[in-house]
Image (cartoon, rainbow, N blue to C red):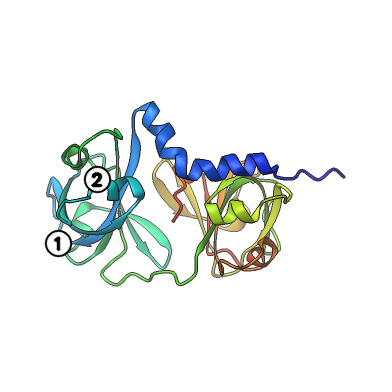
Amino acid sequence: MRRHLLPLALVALALLSVGASSTLAARSGSISYEFNGRLLADAGSSPTLFVDVKGGNHAALRKLLGQSDDQHFAVDSNTEYLRWSHGVPTVVPESNLAAGDFVSVKVRADRAASLAAIEATPARIVSDRGPSPRFAHKPLWLFVGTLNAPAAGGKLTLHIQSGNWLALHAMLGQALDQTFKYDRSTIFVLWQGRVPTLISPSQLKVGDKISVRIRAPRRDSLAQAEQVPANHVAEHEPATPST
């Protein structure tokens, strides 16, 4: 049987796309900004969220250079609020957000937009992880691809198409079809639009886009990382982030 290997050129392009995706998006008009921090006031039904920003993606942090870390972000009736608890997302009303909670505010705006213009653009998604979120102690390995066969026996096989830098670097010279482990602690989520629903492994559909998240040491080989049961498996994830 012929093995389909991930060509070095393809991986190189994929790795470059991790850093260049914002440039490509800029040409199409807009990119994603993610701001992470503590909510400074209860949300209630306010048209803005007041956040003490502690971090974010590269695009967001560039806009914050020389600015205060306390910022107001617009929200509206189309903003979706997700409460994450033990890795499980639940759609909640804005009033569920409380001062002191750690939130991630995701806004889509033009790359050339000013910080003020970005903050005036209603957020698409606000993720709330509560006042004492648990942060991972091991790096993320993110693999994205299509499901080759029904998940069974604690294993699922993907035809890899994308991922984060760590995962794609490990894929150099490897077969495109890779098998991952899962166990009772693995969380399976089906996204319908921006609405998540918990599902079982047997409900994953062959041919659908699947993202697999594994927490494993950076020095691990691909084979070693694949022996670690996935933390999270998502079907039709809206826009697979690198976190």
Question: In the rendering, at what x and y percent does residue 65 appear?
Answer: 22, 50
Which quarter of the rendered picture does the N terminus lie within? top right
Furthest residue toward top:
28
Q: Between residues 117 and 209, which one lies in front from this camera angle? A: 117
Instruction: Name above or below for residue 217 compared with residue 97.
Output: below
Numbered marks: total:
2
Quarter of the image holding residue 12?
top right
SS type, badge 2: helix
**Pointers 2 and 1 in contact (C-beta within 8 Å):** no
**Sequence order check, earlier mark of 2 and 1:** 1
Instruction: Name above or below for residue 108 compared with residue 223.
Output: above
Q: Between residues 75 and 17, which one lies in front from this camera angle? A: 17
Furthest residue toward right:
1
Quarter of the image holding residue 98?
bottom left
Which quarter of the rendered picture does the C terminus lie within? bottom left
Q: Residues within 10 Å of mark 2 (few under 14, many from 20)?
A: some
Task: Residue at 36% x, 57% y: name it.
Answer: 90
Q: Is residue 117 left or right of residue 60?
A: left
Q: Is residue 80 visible?
A: no
For the residue marked with disc 2, what is the amino acid?
A: Lys
Mark in the foreground, 2 or 1: 2
Q: Which residue is mark 2?
A: 63
Furthest residue toward front:
66
For the residue marked with disc 1, what is the amino acid?
A: Leu
Q: Which residue is mark 1?
A: 40
Task: Residue at 35% x, 49% y: name it.
Answer: 58
Question: In the rendering, at what x and y percent does residue 119 appear?
Answer: 19, 43
